[in-house]
Structures are given as structure tokens and as C-alpha cells.
Amino acid sequence: MTADNRVTVFRPEDILGFIPHALGLWPKESLVAITLRGQTLGATLRVDLPGERSDRALAAYSRRIGEYLEADHDADGVLLAFFSDDGWDAGGAVPHGLPLLEALVRVLDHRAWCCGMHGSLVPTTGEAHSAPMWSAVPFPAVP
């Protein structure tokens, strides 16, 4: 008998709750990317957030993420979650993450994944005050 390993996702909180289980840990200072195949979750990637935040460094980091995600040949979209403590105390978490998100959008849009992309910024403490970024991001989101 085969176990049913499906995960049902209705809201961003559902996928954010799934990520630590998929990885076996709560990510800290990390980007987590999960490829999509239609409405099915694909490969999960966790990488450290870049230390350098120059435009050039973010572009190189984003290209590398794009290369990793291309290994899932059946993927047609990607979910992105940023896990970081930076900016939460000062209320600047979303603006702090936007340059990286914009660099990723440029790379992933080039790969025609933009319309299947969603993003969220989460404090690494795991507290419930996470702020979804898709309301601040200039690309369409798939319902």
C-alpha cells in the first residue's frame, strides 16, 4: 500500500508551515524555493541568503538560484520564501528583502516562471508576524 503524501495548500501560511517539515529544520537567514508543476509541489531548495547586497552580487546569486531551479525540468513556477531576522525590529523587513526579490524576478521571469511565482518574507524566529511580500512585488501572482 502506498501512503498518500499529498499536502493541501490553501493560504501562504500553509506552505510556510510545510517548509520546516520538508527541510527538517526552521531555516535561518535563508532563501527557500519550491518548484511548482501546475498545482503540485516539486523540488525544494534552501540556500543561505547572500552576504553581499550589491546589485552585482544579487544578480550573480539570482543567476545561480535560477540554474539550480532549472534542474527540475518539469517545473513551470516557483514559490519563494525568505527567512531572515533583518529589519523586523525597525519595520523594514519588506524593503530590505526587495532588492533580492527583484533580482530573482529578473532571472526567473527570463525563464518564463514569473507568472507562477509567489513570495513571502518570514522572520527566522518563526513568530506569527510574517509579512507576505506579494502585495509589494511588481509581478502577477497565480491564484
Image (spheres, helix red, strand yellow):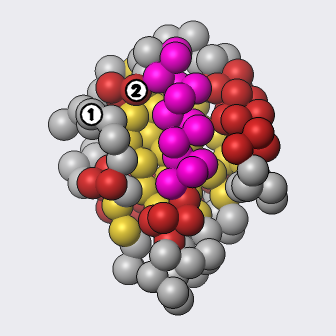
Magenta stretch encompasses residue 134: no
Magenta stretch encompasses residue 108: yes
- Residue situated in front as seen by the camera: 46 or 40: 46
Q: Which mark is residue 30?
A: none
Q: Amino acid at mark 2?
A: Cys
Q: Earlier in the sequence, mark 1 or mark 2?
A: 2
User: x, y (%) of residue 105?
Assistant: 50, 34
User: x, y (%) of residue 132?
Assistant: 35, 61
Question: Residue at horizontal 57%, vertical 51%?
Answer: 99
- Tag 2 secondary structure: helix
Residue 109 seen: yes
Give neighbour class at mark 2: few <14, some 14-19, many 20+ (Cα, 10 Å).
many
Q: Which mark is residue 114?
A: 2
- Which secondary structure class fits the magenta region best? helix
- Tag 1 secondary structure: loop
The quarter of the image holding the N terminus is top left
- Residue situated in front as seen by the camera: 142 or 41: 142
Q: Amino acid at mark 1?
A: Pro
Q: Marks 1 and 2: CB-CB under 8 Å?
A: yes
Residue 25 seen: no
The residue that label 1 is drawn on is 140
Highlighted magenta segment, given as a residue range: 98-111
